[in-house]
Amino acid sequence: MIRTFATHKIRKQTELTGSLWEFESCSGRYAGQKFLLAAPGCWESHPLFADYRGEGIFRKSFQATGDIRIECKGVSHTATVYLDGREIAHHYNAYTPFSAVVADLQPGEHRLEIKADNRFHQESALHVPNDYMSYGGVSRPVVVEELNELYFEYVHVKTYMKNGNWHAKISAAISVLKTGQYRGEEIVVTGRIGNTTFDWKISLEEQEHYELHKDLEIDNVKPWSPEDPELYLVELQMRKGQQILDDIIDRFGFREICVEGQKILLNGKSLRIKGVCRHEDHPDYGCALPYQAIYNDLVLIQQMGANSIRTAHYPNDEIFLDLCDELGILVWEENHARGLEEDRMRHPLFEAQAEAVIREMILNHYNHPSIFIWGILNECASETTFGRSCYEKQFDLIRKMDDTRPYTFASCKFFQDICFDLPNVISCNLYPGWYVDKPVKDYLEEVYHWIEEDGKGKGKPFIVSEIGAGGLYGCHNAYHGKWTEEYQADALTEQVSECLNFPECMGVYIWQFCDVRVSREWFAGRPREMNNKGIVDEYRRPKAAYTKVAEIFKRYSNYYDNDKG
């Protein structure tokens, strides 16, 4: 399953995943032996490779001819792609898509090989041993597309209000495979949003890339909101005479996000965030959750009264984002970096790899109306001068690529942080009652006072981006000791209540939705080699805290304008 809707009617797409692939590990006990593995999938889901860290080769044959584009939605966490024995792509990072275009393919059967590598090695700045699991495999869909000499790269739609009317600012890009093929000829691009049609006429020259822009006023718009997540399609077709060369379809919603003082406004209404942080992790599927499992997670989250999910700590599968668009769930999406101190951030590849994630994340996820904020560099070295330079560069990149959403980072360096002047939303990870032995209200006031007076974050929206406590499913005792379900429920009851009652706090994200596997190097202090702070366990069985949080969340509206709580 590529997306939850069709992105092309003219361009032919064939998904190679959703089937068995030949798999061969490159080291270990079973090196050189061939197995059949399901893709998308993680090799850790196979009993023989449950703890395998190394390289593995996935192979698949397919029929094609002419000019093709092969897109991999996600390979964990380094990929080298070969077609008929020739390398056509190399990509780092498990959580963003990449593609390769191959011209003049001979008719017949062709062999695709993807060498995945989930090792922690010196060329990897972002995938390091961490408080979550870096899996291995072809974890998201692989698609083969048949192209003509000209094809659409993307279409983006920026929506905004002007003089009381909704506008759609459309940006599209066209690539030319063979610049001499149509030189001097006219290409017409036609588009449609609902009942509104538009077009461009392009006289082709010796260019490999064309960018198109159009600003339209759209009548009778129904805005997107969590209560009524209305979605629209933007459809483009490219023609030469009567020949349709290519098409592209994407989905968006009319909504406007802005920061006004200490509030984040959605379509002019002040948001109150009732959220959870969620990892892509499941004991049966690793990070390659299928559609039904993703949907089930979202249902559990909505049933507890939550209205937002933070994609900790990397861009998520686009099927997840599609479902959030459809269900009206607000998304904080962030680039891939967690808990990196200055020595890690000084890795020679860190800045390039982190910025590549931002580019690929925003380029591919720009149109999702559910994404209301971008995040970067969770709990990294925001207390150092070098770290500050990294935050500055990455926020600058976000502003250049997308001026429609606010941006933030989740900090645990308050009382030392020197970066709170950079984002337009302040976010802090707080664990009173777990790591910090202080009453929640006192700790909130202490941290917020420092942010306002010394942290250079005065007058900005403030979010508690993580709060929580550990609890082992089925662990109980009469005195509510740590790691019991009772202790976790008591802690979250106080934490969430105090956050939502704190006048300057515009929302809270619970750490976390479900228990997740961690890197083996992180086993100390993590019973079962898992982060056990989920309000459901790894199999999505609710703990006592789930019911308590649901009772609290359901008392509050999605907007401060509607209900002061």
Image (tube, grey):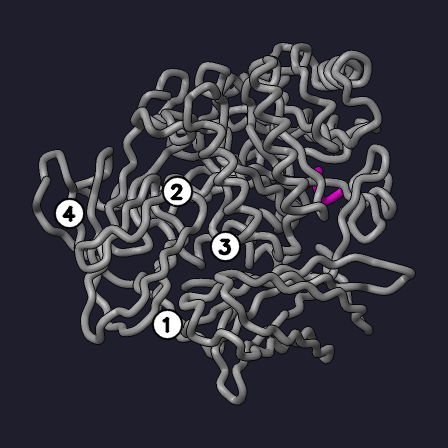
The residue carrying mark 2 is 94
The residue depicted at 80 percent of the width and 27 percent of the height is 502
Question: Residue 360 in the image: x percent, y percent?
Answer: 50, 47
SS at badge 4: strand
Magenta stretch bounds:
551-555
Q: Main secondary structure of the magenta part?
A: helix
Which is more toward the observer, 499 or 147? 147
The reply, left or right, for residue 528 in relation to residue 269 is left
Question: Residue 227 in the image: x percent, y percent?
Answer: 73, 58
Q: Which mark is residue 318?
A: 3
The reply, left or right, for residue 484 in relation to residue 548 is left
Q: Residues within 10 Å of mark 3 (few under 14, many from 20)?
A: many
The residue depicted at 56 percent of the width and 37 percent of the height is 277
C-alpha separation, residue under disc 3 versus residue under disc 1: 22 Å
C-alpha separation, residue under disc 4 versus residue under disc 3: 28 Å
Q: Residue furthest bottom?
A: 242
